[in-house]
Amino acid sequence: MRISEVAALALATRLLEAHRAPRDHAVLQARVLVTAEMKGRPLHGLHCLPRLVEQIKRGVIDPETKGTQRWRADAVMEVEGSSGFGPVVAMAAIERLAPHIPDLGIGLFAVRNANHLGMLAHYVEAIAAMGFIGIALSSSESLVQPFGGTRAMLGTNPVAVAVPTAEEPLVLDLATGLVPLARINHHAATGMPNPEGRPTTDPDRTKAGALAPFEDAKGHGLGIAMELLVAAIAGTALAPDVRGTPDSQSPCNKGGDVFIMIEPSLASGLPARLSAYLDAVRTAPPPAAGDPLLVPGDRARRRQEAASRNGFDIDQRLWEDLNALSRSRILAFEGQRS
Amino acid sequence: MRISEVAALALATRLLEAHRAPRDHAVLQARVLVTAEMKGRPLHGLHCLPRLVEQIKRGVIDPETKGTQRWRADAVMEVEGSSGFGPVVAMAAIERLAPHIPDLGIGLFAVRNANHLGMLAHYVEAIAAMGFIGIALSSSESLVQPFGGTRAMLGTNPVAVAVPTAEEPLVLDLATGLVPLARINHHAATGMPNPEGRPTTDPDRTKAGALAPFEDAKGHGLGIAMELLVAAIAGTALAPDVRGTPDSQSPCNKGGDVFIMIEPSLASGLPARLSAYLDAVRTAPPPAAGDPLLVPGDRARRRQEAASRNGFDIDQRLWEDLNALSRSRILAFEGQRS
């Protein structure tokens, strides 16, 4: 079924508010989930909502905290997430660091003990909207095998980069596993087979096994470098010891979220030069008939614009479940109050 | 033929000194070329030496300058390379920034108008040896096609990362093109066909055409993100306007070298935890018989250690050419002096 952005935001916000989330936290967490749906990344979307609710109920998410920031050095903040929502903790830190970036030129913060961020693109886009270059790295449970190995020893270790230009930013959001964790979880939940041509196409077996790194040796190298970068910067757990991203039982200890914000060069005409270059790539010959070249971020941006006008498709069962969850909770909540 | 590290360093240093390079500059540039040979990356090795000499003679390399550094912000330096040797300019900036990293936590410098760096691993290893995390990004002429396109619009855009641990650092050095530029140049020079299975295996046609990005869409995304990151941070030319990396005619204007230095978390026991994790990856089951898993940097390090003991193989013709070049120049040089 098709739903509108407004209806999705309203439902998600209401549901989170009914579970002790202050309004601004509920709005932000809902915004991150709904934006993922609109960008065509439903695996970071509304299907995460029942798990978030479950995690609040079990006390492994504290919906009220923004985390606390502490300067570790002149240009580096450590953020204790205190089991807050990933988006709430990260955006609070971005807003705290941002006013210092013009003076510093570059700044970094490392988050520990916050919950799942969802789609990293959201954060680097927010940073680019402030006029800065954004880089985000995150770690996860062990899901990816080292090159030549068969046991999962690496996280899916996504990397996101946004570079502001005179027009739309370039936005890269890349998992270093062959396929993102969220897709495996989704295939396991729905019984769809995994993409063809892999040693295993059964998602349950994949979950029990390990994802291949993308492009084998290069992807492995990149994945393991991101693994060590995050752990070395944030001082947090390495993949085999990480808990609490996909399950709702354990407090999330990954903490390995690293954000870097950089003031671009002030060279005259640079933003226009960057846009012109991206346009030249988009119009480079020869695109397949009717299929112009894209640069990272284009496809997701177009989908989001279309979804903003026309709504987006969602699994009917999920939407009904969310509505039922919302109604029951709100009745219970209002019952307590009256 | 096989030559020793000492002989290679002595010859390269002597040749560069005979072309106006001060001793410390000659030693450093020679060290970078010889280390590449020893690490099994001859394409960044001694065969570059005649081109460097040619570039000095044409005045497009100034062998005497270290470049000049200027603080652009509290944690960011801009480096004007003034056509110096890439290694000399970069190492001078690393040494200038390093003492500030414990206070800053993170710092960045962007180089303009310096010559070819060679193997990026060299610099991030030097940064890791100081106890810092090193990240290096570089740009180049247009050599890689966008995903879906056929015209080269991207540089090979290498990325290097080193993370210090309690033992050897992790060292990643990755080009975002399917094969590095240096290999294409080498195949073109020697008439060897390019790696099989590509639309073109003729290296001259490849040089006239474009390299595929590695792993198609993901490699393209990463490549174009690095392209924009470097240009946006350094304010330098984008690939289609870059000159002077492989040719010896034009002054090198790429300038797009970006280095980031980060103080690791001081979390107790972290370096040992990182080493233990890398050891767990190395010994993860099941390695192919007799073929233990490697982490990025292992293979190159082993080769370098072996080459340090036993010397390394070099094309006999190249070695003879270098010796002839060295003798003729030194005679001429001594003739001028006497």
Image: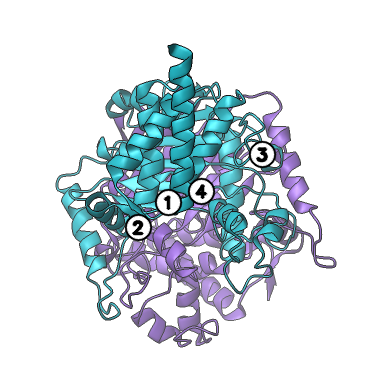
Chain colours: A cyan, B purple
Q: Are marks 3 and 1 on the same chain?
A: yes
Q: Residue A327, percent across and down?
A: 44, 32
**Would residue B259 be found to the left or right of residue B301 on screen?**
left
Circle on res. A296: 2
**Nearer to the camera, B274 or A310:** A310
Which residue lies under the disc numbered 4? Answer: A158
Residues tagged 2 and 3 counted as in contact (Cβ below 8 A) = no
SS of the residue at dot 1? strand
Mark sitting earlier along the chain (4/1)? 4
Residues tagged 4 and 1 counted as in contact (Cβ below 8 A) = yes
Quadrant in the picture for residue B167 = top right
Q: Is residue A128 above or below residue B11?
A: above
SS of the residue at dot 3? loop
Residues tagged 3 and 1 counted as in contact (Cβ below 8 A) = no
Residues tagged 1 and 2 counted as in contact (Cβ below 8 A) = yes
**Would residue A92 be found to the left or right of residue A56 on screen?**
left
Q: Chain of mark 3?
A: A
Residues tagged 4 and 3 counted as in contact (Cβ below 8 A) = no
Q: Residues within 10 Å of mark 1 (few under 14, many from 20)?
A: many
Circle on res. A238: 3
Q: Chain of mark 4?
A: A
Q: Residue at x 42, y 21 (%)?
A: A74
Q: Residue B78, percent across and down?
A: 31, 39
The answer to whether residue A72 of the structure is visible from this angle is no
Mark sitting earlier along the chain (4/2)? 4
Residue type beneath disc 3:
Leu
